[in-house]
Amino acid sequence: MFGLYKKFKDGLAKTVSAIAAKTHGLFGGRRIAAASLDELEEALYTADFGVETTNEILAEIKQAYGKDKELRGRQAAEIGATVLQRVLAGAEGVLTPSSPAPTVIVMIGVNGSGKTTTAAKLAWMLKQDGRRVTVAACDTFRAAAIEQLKAWATRLELDLVASHTGADAAAVAFDAWQAAKARGSDYLIVDTAGRLHTKGNLLEELAKIRRVLQKHDATAPQHRWLVVDGSIGSNSIEQAKVFHKNFGLTGLVVTKLDGTSRGGAIVGIWRELKLPIYFVGLGEQPEDLQPFSVENYAKAVFSLED
């Protein structure tokens, strides 16, 4: 648990530092003051926690402060973390294999969200867990995506099914499912395009991939995850709504949390969409993709060590 907490603490370092800077180290051992609560309010807004969550955290800390003027920063942090855990209750997605295999995970998202990299990291993680995984390079619109996935597959020794730029993405998905079945793969991870000439083209391509996969397995794809760039904050909510409406998302992966001071956006995304968050990106290395943990996230934000 401590090792995973450290991953979250390190990955959310920019968010934690930004909050600490604005609150002048509020969450240390010193006694809090009324002015400290104003600082905390500004810090939480800046970190993109949103009005609703910020108000809930402040209300509970103020209530405790009203009862005890000796309230310490550490106690305020514990209250804040408790509120976050309550708000995020049910947000953890748990990946389990379906039967019959392979379980199909389609990765969806706009270009630049970290989708292709996340597909490779997820495959590696599952492989480390003893699972057999096949990856399908179905972003055939962008040559760089195919090459990027090939490079990751070589580096991490992943089974990859790929074609050429401009190939029919659904046909690649069809072949990949057959290959995954023949290899006895537990999972098939499908990387998809993030942009075509129009949004309509993109959504139709995703629908076609889904139809083709269902020719093999009527329940496929069992998972349809949107990969969201955590650094764009709450702006990602509208993006998610479009994909959810058209493709029926089953979960989220939030990437690049290590590169932003707006790590609170993950809370707003959950409150708005109520889609489980399966994994978060906390760094550049394969092992920096981690299962989302509400407890570790909340403790890291408020600098609470185990």
Image: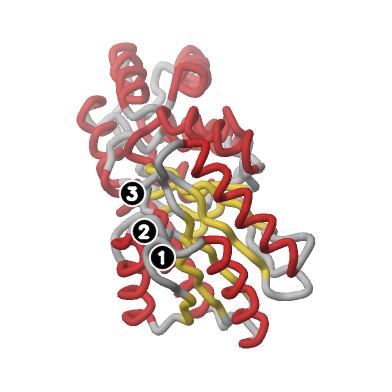
Give me the C-alpha separation between circle 2 and circle 3. Answer: 16 Å
Badge 1 is on which residue?
A: 3
Element type where label 1 sits in the image = helix
Q: Can residue 89 be seen in the rendering of this structure?
A: yes
Q: Can residue 295 be seen in the rendering of this structure?
A: no
Marks 1 & 2, CB-CB < 8 Å contact: yes
Q: Considering depth in this image, is 56 or 146 the residue closer to the camera?
A: 146
**Residue visible at 67% across and 68% down in the picture:** 103
Q: In the rendered view, would you say 168 is above or below 86?
A: below
Crowd class of label 3 (few under 14; some 14 to 19; many from 20; radius 10 Å): many
Q: Considering depth in this image, is 62 or 127 the residue closer to the camera?
A: 127
Q: Considering depth in this image, is 27 or 30 the residue closer to the camera?
A: 27
Of badges 2 and 3, nearer the viewer stands 3
Q: In the rendered view, would you say 50 is above or below 192?
A: above
The amino acid beneath tag 2 is Lys
Numbered badge on residue 256: 3
The amino acid beneath tag 3 is Lys
Please report whichever mark, 2 or 3, sits nearer to the chain's N-terminal start: 2
